[in-house]
Amino acid sequence: MAQLAASAPWWAWPLALFVACFLLGIIAVPAGVGGGVLFVPIVAGFFPFHLDYVRGAGQLVALSGALVAAPRLLSTGLASLRLGLPLGLVAAASSIAGALLGFAVDAARLEVALGIAILGIVAVMAAARESRGGPQRPPDALAAALGMHGVFVDGATGATQPWSAQRTPQAIALFVLIGLVAGLFGLGAGWANVPALNLLMGVPLKLAAGTSGLIIATSSSSAAWIYLHQGAVLPVVAAPSILGMMLGARIGVRVLHRARASMVRRLVIAMLLFAGARALAKGMGWWN
């Protein structure tokens, strides 16, 4: 890999990065995952960039997608500010701690940890199922105090669904961990936010997916400042990554209407499984 990087012209790798991120953006939307969780392990494993620069670009990739989507999500009722803001603040604080921790750990050990984390994400994605919910229950005490309840209107069917958050203290503890992992590896957190909101808190799946974007915007914007301050945001890596991912995501929205989401999701799980194994082997010195 090092010999190939040295022999290639300077513009070859940014161009390859743009093409790769364009393809990842197409896949990420139908699969229901943020671009960061695909971007970091694949680029870190197969491109000759230092892991710090890849993690910094990953934060900006996740942040840019969330910021673009957030106004639309709020205006259409697909996201709840009362639900997303408290959880986003918790995740933002822990993501700062995760980003700082990442710069204190040796790159090889961080690569091993990244591989383990990605393989764990594969297990979460493979096991996660939508919560259909049971009889509507009142919100727990903390959720009631924070106003985490309401009525969700499905734009596709026009059906209304009352919802109220459950197990809020446990969810806050979980979002501390989610923010820490997202800040540490620059992954974004859509892979964990949606199952936590839907399966643990009992929030309708579409509302969980939309609110996840608000949480990512809050947590990634906080961690991004750490990467900027540490000089880990390299424009030649970040710019083509963001541009490719955003353009690919526009096509991914159209693919979402035609492709079977389950098939795309299986493809993503296979890609992450390979990329996680590659990151683990690279960190252990087995495959460089």
Image (spheres, rainbow, N blue to C red):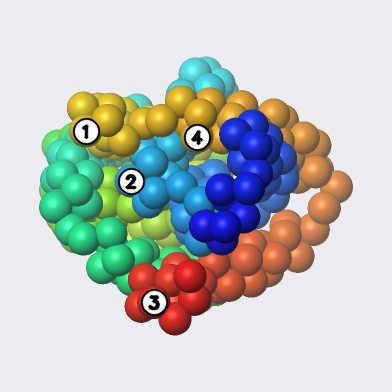
Camera-nearest residue between 222 and 58: 58
Q: Which of disc 3 and disc 2 is earlier in sequence? A: 2
Q: Is residue 213 left or right of residue 242?
A: left
Image quarter (top left, top right, bottom left or bottom right) of the N terminus: bottom right
Instruction: Classify mark 4: helix, strand or loop.
Output: helix
The location of residue 191, given as percent across then percent down, is 46, 55
Query: Which disc number belongs to residue 285?
Result: 3
Q: Which of disc 3 and disc 1 is earlier in sequence? A: 1
The location of residue 9, given as percent across then percent down, is 65, 37
Q: Which residue is mark 2?
A: 52
Give the Cα separation between the discs numbered 4 and 2.
11 Å
The location of residue 53, given as percent across then percent down, is 38, 41
Q: Are marks 3 and 4 in contact (CB under 8 Å)?
A: no
Camera-nearest residue between 4 and 168: 4
From where the camera sits, is residue 252 visible?
yes
Camera-nearest residue between 84 and 175: 175
Instruction: Classify mark 3: helix, strand or loop.
Output: loop
Q: Which residue is mark 1?
A: 230
Residue lying at 35% horizontally and 64% vertically, measured from the top left: 111
Residue lying at 43% horizontally and 37% vertically, measured from the top left: 57
Q: Is residue 59 left or right of residue 44?
A: left
Q: Which of disc 1 and disc 2 is earlier in sequence? A: 2
Give the Cα separation between the discs numbered 4 and 1.
15 Å
Camera-nearest residue between 86 and 228: 228
Q: Which residue is mark 4?
A: 237
Graded by Cα atoms within 10 Å as few (under 14), some (14 to 19) or many (20 or more), the crowding at tag 4 reads: many
Tell me the kind of residue under disc 3: Gly
